[in-house]
Image (cartoon, rainbow, N blue to C red):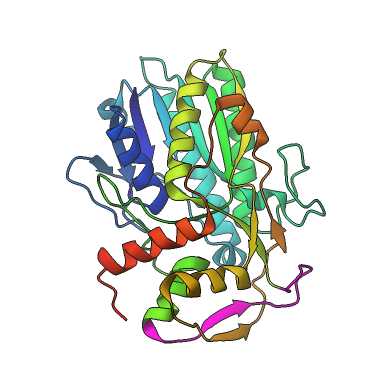
Amino acid sequence: MNFLITGSSGYIGSVTALTLMEAGHNVVGLDSGERGNFKHHSLKTIKKDLRTSVRKISPSVEGTESIIHFAAYAYVDESTKKPFTYLDNNIRALLNVLEMSSRWKSRLKSIVLSSTCSIYGDNKNQVLSESEPPSPKNPYADSKYYCEKILREYCEETGVRGVALRYFNVGGAKLTGSIAGEEHTPETHVIPLLINSAIKNCPFIINGTDYDTPDGTCIRDYIHVCDLAEAHKVAAEYASNKEEGYFKVFNVGSGAGHSVLQVKEMVESVIGKGIPVEIGPKRTGDPAKLIADIDLIKETMGWRPFKSGLRNIINDAFSYQLNHRKAHF
């Protein structure tokens, strides 16, 4: 298939692009370069800010059969400080991509939207299924929920098929074939922050220890980035063969939850080094617990999270930091 990947220079976008290319698909990337820093000689990438008109680039990606849309701002804490910026950026980018694809003479088959589990907000259930009522608690989650609604309406009106993947906390790295890993600036994710604390011998900040969880720290479902990339590939192929106007939301995670303290202990076990901690304030908009019910995607598409054990995720993240970012203790 011919794929267009927006946000192809980001962490998940780059791993997905490489996964598709290694599976024999034709891939073109589209990225503004504002936040993503991944570059690969074999990936054709168009540098373009999706908040502006994309009419000029439309002919160059004519013939795209499936779009995987990652391009978005994605920091929960930042979104609470810049709510309009997040809503404007994330919604405008999707609208411009849809407007661009509607101009193509050749028929687009499917669109896969990168969405988020934070749409569920604080939910009393231990494990979250797609049937849970949305309750976004921050502007980032709001923006993604609006994007899901927009894509649903677009699919119904145009006949294009769509899937939204609500995924949970992503970690690890792609260490076989072409290499890609996590390099955010600023870094806000727990696993790389813990590894960096160990490397730099500086305290790791735990944001809140009085959540309604057994040890007081947030519980999250962690998925390996390679499993997530495969889920996007499978979703695009699946949706492309469904009836016109098809749209559905799927969770993507491991199905298991781990607290911040449990992740810290696993990182210490993997690297053989203690990590000092300091207790900081809660981050605005952070739910206490988010764990995925992944039965629907498993039963519908046959996808499975083969690499998403917590130790394996941390092993791969640490190996990437040590061998590809030249980090040293």
Q: Is residue 195 above or below residue 66?
A: below
Mainly helix, strand or loop, the magenta region?
A: loop
Q: Residue at horizontal 78%, vertical 53%?
A: 123
Q: Residue extending furthest left?
A: 41
**In front: 308, or 10?**
308
Front position in the image: 93 or 256: 256
- Residue 285's spot in the image, x, y percent? 68, 64
| Quadrant position of the N terminus in the picture | top left
Quadrant position of the C terminus in the picture: bottom left
In the depicted structure, whether residue 146 falls above or below residue 180:
above
Residue 3 picture location, percent across and down: 35, 29
Locate residue 175 relative to residue 162 in the image: left or right: left
Picture quadrant of residue 294: top right
Image coordinates for residue 45, horizontal then vertical, percent: 25, 42
Position of residue 74 in the picture relative to residue 52 (left or right):
right
Instruction: Specify the segment rendered in magenta.
Output: 200-216
The x and y percentages for residue 258 are: 63, 62
Which residue does the image show at 73% across and 73% down from the upper left? Answer: 215
State which quadrant residue 218 falls in.
bottom right
- Horizontal relation, residue 23 to residue 131: left or right: left
Q: Is residue 111 left or right of residue 35?
A: right
The answer to whether any part of residue 107 appears in the image is yes
Is residue 56 visible in the rendered structure shown here? Answer: no
Instruction: Reply above or below: 304 against 48.
Output: above
The residue sitting at 29% across, 47% down in the picture is 176
- Residue 209 magenta-highlighted: yes
Quadrant of res 273: bottom left
